[in-house]
């Protein structure tokens, strides 16, 4: 369920074609940037994303305590390569960002083939792929390469140059808020820290950035939408240190967006909070996009585990296609542009928008202003004024369900679940009843009402 399209079918088709082309163009600009937890590649990534939504940037200084963690130094990479005994440069970070172990410390010297092997990483079960390896919090240097290449390295001395530096800089976070009628919020979070990983990295921020444009075009938003772009784990923890108390009071629903660009079916990982608005909205709308792989909440995975930490308990689920760790290209150089199905990526934006739409309208609650018996609907134009056999059976079912369950405790999603009626039918009926003076919308009551059914 998305917001109603604007314009003629031809105009809608043309708009989608433009969006599809723009997705590819932005991907191609982001792909070569050397991202990590910190650094200029991350800032350049945020610069490009900021062309699509008004990002407010936060630079969190190295060394700052954020709960039980400390923001690491900023990693600067000038060059890093390995030269074989014959002088051929066989590994080079400028050839592929994944060749250098993330956060490698400086080293320059000549080492034997045996010594070099202690600093090499490969995957015997995927012999042609370069693995993605990091060492953020333990000082080491290393290189990654295909196992097939590693097995044929000659004996002799290898020249190694790791021209890097760990400096007192900062870690980059960005956010944008799309205001609605209320200050209750939906949190949408994506990571910007993985180099040269297409599905695992770039699909998430692309969905988030293009989703912003979709939501900004809605004629009305009941809720406000906060978009966050940050490095995984430490970035989410730093963001919670910055905004956590506000989010704890205001967030009604949320999504971590990741691994959303392959051709697999949608996967939804539920929130920690049983019966959350996010989960109920997902159950209502995602099946319309085909088979859905439903996953229970676990305190492992991506940043949903930070948002769900017990001190915050934010109702944040995860929207993906094939889940991280479950496709063979994950965290390797095979997770490249060829893995991305841009039609599926656009479909992930559709699904995220539908879920946001269900949260936005489905979380609304109403109070029946005529609760003592059934109000006369016919004189208000809400019921057929002529009965002919069974033709009026079901004609006002949505209104009857609304009037009966609009007691301030049931939101529209809860009424949809209980009645079996489509959410959009209930939204339309609620608007008609409110216009007729039978219902009044209630102010947001916070997340305590999420599980009402």
Image (tube, rainbow, N blue to C red):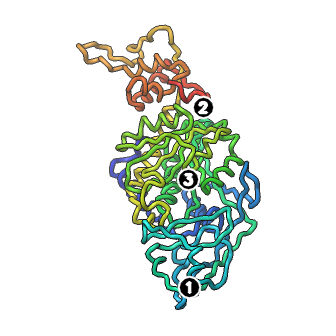
Q: Residue furthest top?
A: 373
Instruction: Tell me whether circle 2 and circle 3 mark residues in contact (CB < 8 Å).
Output: no
Q: Nearer the viewer, mark 1 or mark 3?
A: 1
Q: Position of residue 427 (x, y in %)?
A: 44, 29
Q: Secondary structure at mark 3?
A: strand
Question: Residue at horizontal 54%, vertical 73%?
Answer: 99
Q: Label 2: how many residues lie within 10 Å, few (<14), some (14-19) or many (20+)?
A: some
Mark 2 → mark 3, Cα distance in angstroms = 23 Å
Camera sees residue 426: yes
Residue 271 quadrant: top right
Residue 211: give its label: none
Residue situated in front as seen by the camera: 270 or 134: 134
Mark 1 → mark 3, Cα distance in angstroms = 37 Å
Residue 72 quadrant: bottom right
Work out whether mark 2 precedes mark 3 in sequence or the reverse, and give the earlier one: 3
* Residue under label 3: 190
Judge whether 95 appears above or below 452 on screen: below
* Residue under label 1: 83
Judge whether 285 appears above or below 94 on screen: above
Work out whether mark 1 precedes mark 2 in sequence or the reverse, and give the earlier one: 1
Q: Position of residue 45 (x, y in %)?
A: 58, 63
Residue situated in front as seen by the camera: 411 or 240: 240
Q: Secondary structure at mark 2?
A: helix
Q: Which image quarter holds the N terminus? A: top left
Work out whether mark 1 precedes mark 3 in sequence or the reverse, and give the earlier one: 1
Q: Position of residue 381 (x, y in %)?
A: 39, 18
Residue situated in front as seen by the camera: 113 or 168: 113
Instruction: Tell me whether circle 1 and circle 2 mark residues in contact (CB < 8 Å).
Output: no
Mark 1 → mark 2, Cα distance in angstroms = 58 Å
Residue 447: give its label: 2
Q: Label 1: how many residues lie within 10 Å, few (<14), some (14-19) or many (20+)?
A: some
Q: Position of residue 182 (x, y in %)?
A: 61, 35
């Amino acid at each position: 369920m998305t917001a109603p399209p604007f314009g003629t079918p031809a105009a809608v088709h043309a708009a989608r074609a433009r969006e599809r082309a723009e997705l590819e163009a932005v991907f191609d600009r982001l792909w070569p940037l050397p991202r990590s937890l910190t650094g200029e590649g991350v800032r350049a990534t945020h610069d490009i994303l900021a062309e699509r939504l008004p990002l407010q940037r936060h630079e969190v200084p190295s060394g700052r305590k954020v709960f039980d963690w400390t923001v690491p130094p900023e990693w600067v990479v000038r060059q890093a390569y390995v030269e074989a005994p014959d002088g051929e440069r066989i590994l080079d970070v400028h050839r592929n960002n994944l060749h250098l172990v993330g956060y490698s410390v400086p080293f320059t010297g000549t080492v034997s083939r045996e010594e070099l092997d202690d600093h090499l990483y490969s995957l015997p079960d995927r012999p042609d792929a370069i693995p993605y390896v990091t060492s953020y919090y333990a000082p080491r240097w290393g290189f990654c390469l295909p196992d097939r290449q590693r097995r044929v390295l000659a004996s002799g001395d290898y020249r190694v140059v790791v021209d890097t530096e760990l400096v007192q800089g900062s870690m980059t976070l960005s956010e944008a808020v799309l205001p609605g009628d209320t200050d209750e919020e939906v949190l949408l979070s994506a990571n910007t820290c993985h180099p040269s990983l297409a599905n695992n990295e770039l699909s998430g921020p692309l969905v988030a950035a293009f989703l912003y444009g979709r939501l900004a075009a809605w004629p009305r938003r009941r809720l406000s939408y906060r978009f966050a772009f940050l490095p995984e784990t430490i970035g989410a923890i730093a963001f919670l240190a910055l905004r956590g108390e506000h989010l704890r009071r205001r967030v009604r629903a949320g999504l971590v967006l990741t691994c959303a660009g392959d051709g697999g079916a949608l996967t939804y990982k539920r929130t920690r909070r049983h019966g959350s608005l996010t989960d109920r909205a997902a159950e209502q709308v995602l099946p319309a996009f085909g088979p859905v792989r439903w996953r229970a909440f676990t305190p492992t995975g991506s940043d949903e585990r930070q948002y769900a930490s017990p001190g915050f308990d934010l109702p944040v689920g995860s929207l993906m296609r094939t889940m991280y760790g479950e496709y063979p290209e994950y965290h390797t150089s095979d997770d490249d542009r060829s893995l991305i199905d841009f039609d599926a990526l656009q479909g992930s934006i559709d699904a995220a928008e539908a879920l946001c739409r269900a949260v936005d309208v489905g979380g609304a609650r109403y109070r029946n202003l005529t609760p003592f018996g059934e109000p006369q609907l016919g004189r208000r134009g809400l019921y057929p004024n002529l009965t002919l056999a069974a033709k009026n059976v079901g004609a006002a079912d949505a209104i009857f369900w609304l009037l009966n369950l609009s007691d301030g405790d049931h939101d529209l999603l809860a009424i949809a679940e209980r009645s079996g009626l489509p959410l959009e039918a209930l939204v339309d009926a609620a608007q008609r009843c409110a216009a007729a003076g039978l219902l009044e919308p209630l102010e947001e009551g916070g997340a305590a009402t999420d599980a009402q059914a």
